Image (spheres, helix red, strand yellow):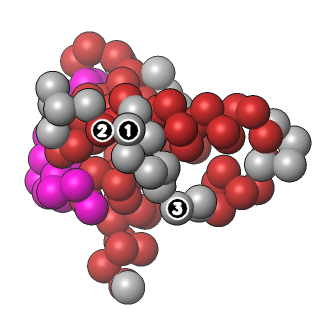
Amino acid sequence: MSKPPASNPARDAVRSFVPKLIDLTEKVVYGDVWERPGLSKRDRSLITCAALVAMNRTEQLKGHVARAIDNGVTKDEIVEVITHMAFYSGWPTAMSAAGVAKAVLEEGEKK
């Protein structure tokens, strides 16, 4: 198991309220599951973004779109995932995801 990722604002905002949840997030989800050799981080990012689109979890999608870019997923691939998911999870979930992804990507371009 590798060391967990650095803290981030979303986790830090609730760390004192749900410390065990954050501990599990950092040690198990990011420290173990994301480090397993069976899938690349790029592939895990694509899968995670698709799942978050399907479940309409736009708040979580924000961070995972940025993580996906860091893991080598392109803007065009994120657009394709969202478009593809429209036919499996519904038009409203894809439209909501499109707005979130667009904002994240535009913010990333400003940096």
- The answer to if 59 sits in the magenta stretch is no
**Mark 3: secondary structure:** loop
- Of mark 3 and mark 1, the one earlier in the sequence is 1
Q: Which mark is residue 35?
A: 2
**Mark 2: secondary structure:** helix
Q: Label 3 vs label 1: CA separation?
A: 15 Å
Q: Amino acid at mark 3?
A: Ala
Residue sitting at x 26%, y 14%: 88
Name the image quarter holding residue 49. Answer: top left
| Bounds of the magenta segment | 70-86
Q: Amino acid at mark 1?
A: Met
The residue identified by callout 1 is 1
Name the image quarter holding residue 45. Answer: top left
The residue furthest front is 1
Q: Where in the figure is residue 39, as x and y percent of width and height?
A: 16, 31
Q: Which mark is residue 6?
A: 3
- The answer to if 77 sits in the magenta stretch is yes
Residue sitting at x 28%, y 51%: 68
Q: Few, some or many C-alpha atoms within 10 Å of disc 3 (few <14, some 14-19, many ≥20)? A: few
**Mark 1: secondary structure:** loop
- Quarter of the image where the C terminus is located: bottom left
Q: Few, some or many C-alpha atoms within 10 Å of disc 2 (few <14, some 14-19, many ≥20)? A: some
